[in-house]
């Protein structure tokens, strides 16, 4: 059995969903009430691969909402309680979705293996970052040519290059795709220098310079809402792959020749009988999902019950090959510009 741990995109949205599900006592509560609400296993689902293999899964809402990010202890408790529930339900492999994997890593939850009388078994959990990185790299390869960009000559900026997902995307683009030039962006210099050494190439640039030079920009950092980029400084054409969470770049970059694509999203080949992706505001919530969630399904399909994506900067090309092949085999395709155009006119 696979599991997905997620959360609503806002407090308002969480209240609306709780009301629909009949949890009126929680729905009416204020943020303090929500801070003490336990995680809920809200949905069971069955999924069949094109190979004929059928797997079962469950969606656990952590009852975390982004408005709690400033409450360190609450955020930590929400993630650990949801993980405890997944383990107690006997789920073999569970993906930490949305902010939950970021909270796990940034708040160093590895130090908190004991939750009440449960010892968390880490090999039951995955961040899903290997699949996310593979999907974003493939989205660059598939969509750049669609807007007239020749990747062999293109400059590709990766904003968040030293992160877990960003470094894996850089490894792929440098070694597999062979892009013209990689532009590496992050705030801290030493990890950038180390990455450039590992890649044996790439140019370290400040955000504004990289964005104005790049034919393709991969965003794999949670950027501040206040980020301002002057559209006239962008190249035409320019492909922006919005791999961060939340996905809010389409409102920032408008203008002719700028194509903003939702990054790290996959589509399953047929409808899934769940409603959980409505929470994440997917355009086709019966088929589309975050690639990190799909990783838990792929690991279950492949009987690979291990913390496949774990820690920071451990994603190898071999792991990306494994999860990428499984993704294709089990009926997932990457979300591409043409899906976005179809959705806009639907
Ligand atoms: P990490 O914390 O490992 O990496 C974040 C990277 O962003 C680092 O390189 C960091 O370097 C850089 N960074 C952070 N803030 C800034 C800034 N203001 N300007 C420039 N660089 C910055 O995160 P992950 O790789 O795990 O995740 C990256 C993003 O992907 C997150 O937003 C996450 O939510 C999203 N994600 C999306 C998924 C999906 O859509 N399917 C699934 C999983 C994650 P430094 O600190 O030196 O600046």
Image (spheres, rainbow, N blue to C red):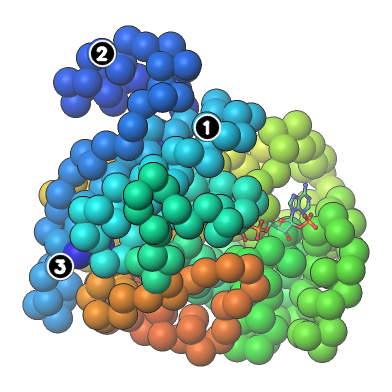
Residue pictured at 53% horizontal, 41% vertical = 76
Q: Secondary structure at mark 1?
A: helix
Q: Which residue is mark 3?
A: 55
Q: Nearer the viewer, mark 1 or mark 2?
A: 1
316 vs 51, left or right, is right
Which image quadrant is residue 120 in?
bottom left
Residue beneath the point at 79% across and 77% down: 195
Q: Distance of mark 3 from mark 2, alpha carbons?
A: 33 Å
Q: Which residue is mark 1?
A: 74
Image location of residue 181, percent across then percent down? 79, 78
> How far, Cα to Cα, is label 1 from label 3?
33 Å
> Is 18 or 52 nearer to us in this picture?
18
For the residue labelled by badge 3, is the local secondary structure a helix, a strand or a loop?
Answer: strand
Residue 92 shown left or right of residue 207 in the figure: left
Query: Which label sits in the foreground, 3 or 2?
Result: 2
Q: Tell me the number on the disc at residue 25.
A: 2
Picture quarter with the C terminus: top left
Question: Does residue 263 appear left or right of residue 48 in this picture?
Answer: right
Mark closer to the chain start, 1 or 3: 3
Q: How many marks?
A: 3
Given contact means CB atoms under 8 Å apart, are the residues at marks 1 and 2 in contact?
no
Residue 220 placement (x, y as % from top left): 64, 57
Q: Indicate the quadrant of ligand 1 in the picture.
A: bottom right
CB atoms of marks 3 and 2 within 8 Å: no
Q: Residue at x 56, y 86 (%)?
A: 317
């Amino acid at each position: 059995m696979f599991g997905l741990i997620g959360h609503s995109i806002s407090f308002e949205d969480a209240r609306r969903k709780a009301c629909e599900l009949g949890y009126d006592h929680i729905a009416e509560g204020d943020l303090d009430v929500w801070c003490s609400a336990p995680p809920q296993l809200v949905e069971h689902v069955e999924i069949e691969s094109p190979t004929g293999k059928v797997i079962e899964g469950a969606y656990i809402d952590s009852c975390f909402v982004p408005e709690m990010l400033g409450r360190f202890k609450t955020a930590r408790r929400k993630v650990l309680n949801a993980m405890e529930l997944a383990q107690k339900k006997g789920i073999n492999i569970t993906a930490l979705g949305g902010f939950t994997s970021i909270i796990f890593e940034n708040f160093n939850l590895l130090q908190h293996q004991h939750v009440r009388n449960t010892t968390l078994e880490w090999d039951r959990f995955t961040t899903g970052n290997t699949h996310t990185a593979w999907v974003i790299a493939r989205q660059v390869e598939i969509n750049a040519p669609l807007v007239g960009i020749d990747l062999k000559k293109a400059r590709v900026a990766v904003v968040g290059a030293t992160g877990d997902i960003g470094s894996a995307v850089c490894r792929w683009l440098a070694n597999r795709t062979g892009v013209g030039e990689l532009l590496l962006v992050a705030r801290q210099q030493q990890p950038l220098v180390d990455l450039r050494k590992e890649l044996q190439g790439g140019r370290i640039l400040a955000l504004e310079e990289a964005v104005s030079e790049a034919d393709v920009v991969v965003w794999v950092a949670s950027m501040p809402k206040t980020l301002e980029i002057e559209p006239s400084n962008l190249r035409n054409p320019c492909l922006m792959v919005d791999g961060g969470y939340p996905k809010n770049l389409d409102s920032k970059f408008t203008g002719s020749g700028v194509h903003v694509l939702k990054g790290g999203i996959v589509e399953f080949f047929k409808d899934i009988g769940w409603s959980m992706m409505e929470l994440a505001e997917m355009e086709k919530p019966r088929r589309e999902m975050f690639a990190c969630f799909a990783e838990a399904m792929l690991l279950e399909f492949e009987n690979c019950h291990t913390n496949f994506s774990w820690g920071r900067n451990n994603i190898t090309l071999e792991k990306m090959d494994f999860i990428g092949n499984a993704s294709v085999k089990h009926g997932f395709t990457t979300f591409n510009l043409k899906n976005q155009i179809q959705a806009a006119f639907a």
